[in-house]
Image (tube, coloured by chain):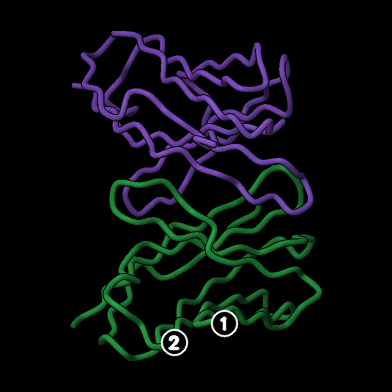
Amino acid sequence: NAGVTQTPKFRILKIGQSMTLQCTQDMNHNYMYWYRQDPGMGLKLIYYSVGAGITDKGEVPNGYNVSRSTTEDFPLRLELAAPSQTSVYFCASSYSTSHNEQFFGPGTRLTVL
Amino acid sequence: GEDVEQSLFLSVREGDSSVINCTYTDSSSTYLYWYKQEPGAGLQLLTYIFSNMDMKQDQRLTVLLNKKDKHLSLRIADTQTGDSAIYFCAETGGFKTIFGAGTRLFVKA
């Protein structure tokens, strides 16, 4: 099993550009999450999904969109990049809502200039 | 609202014990977790404790839970340079998990 994979690893965007961060898991997990990690701030939940076709907002959803057409894939879309979106983005998945061990991807480091 | 707090830095000498502390606010949390993040990588589950337990030991790791004070700690015995990382405390009562800001552990040789 590859676990959770994310692409790209690094990206630099100009203000106003758009991009999609890809996330795929091969563990057949129903639950998937997108977080952003800012220095000294821990992880903030952007969006989550409890299964294919179902997504919901997390703590900091503004400026982002997601879709979940399959169990495996959970892409995160930035439509109009802003400097405030400079961060490290992590995708995660889990199989249970009781013991919610989350499996994380390696992250995407995004810089918006 | 729900919140998890932990100190940002800890420095220890190789071979000493490390103790990382965390406080949380949601008394309904069923599981509490410690995740480890090495440089350039995602978080990885280190250990966890169910809310009806006071202590859990796993090789060099000891987790203590004080439910009354909503305090969680992680003790690493015989700390090694390979333990240098960021350690995140987290709580969950369902499919959403609340993470602390992380404690960066420095291990001096």
Instruction: Locate residue B87, reporting x and y percent.
Output: 43, 64
Which numbered dot is residue B77? 2
| Chain seen in purple | A
Picture colour for chain B = green
Q: Quadrant of the C terminus of chain A?
A: top left
The answer to which quarter of the image holds residue B34 is bottom right
Depth check: give the residue in front, B35 or A87.
B35
User: In the rendered structure, which amino acid carries the disc numbered 1?
Assistant: Thr
Residue at point 35%, 82% (across, down): B79
The residue that disc 1 covers is B62
Q: Residue furthest front?
A: A1
Q: Residue B41 vs residue A26: left or right?
A: left
**Disc marking residue A29:** none
Q: Which of the 4 image quarters holds residue A18? A: top left
Q: Are marks 1 and 2 in contact (CB under 8 Å)?
A: yes
> How packed is label 1: few (under 14 Cα within 10 Å), some, or many (20 or more)?
some
Q: Is residue B39 above or below residue A19?
A: below
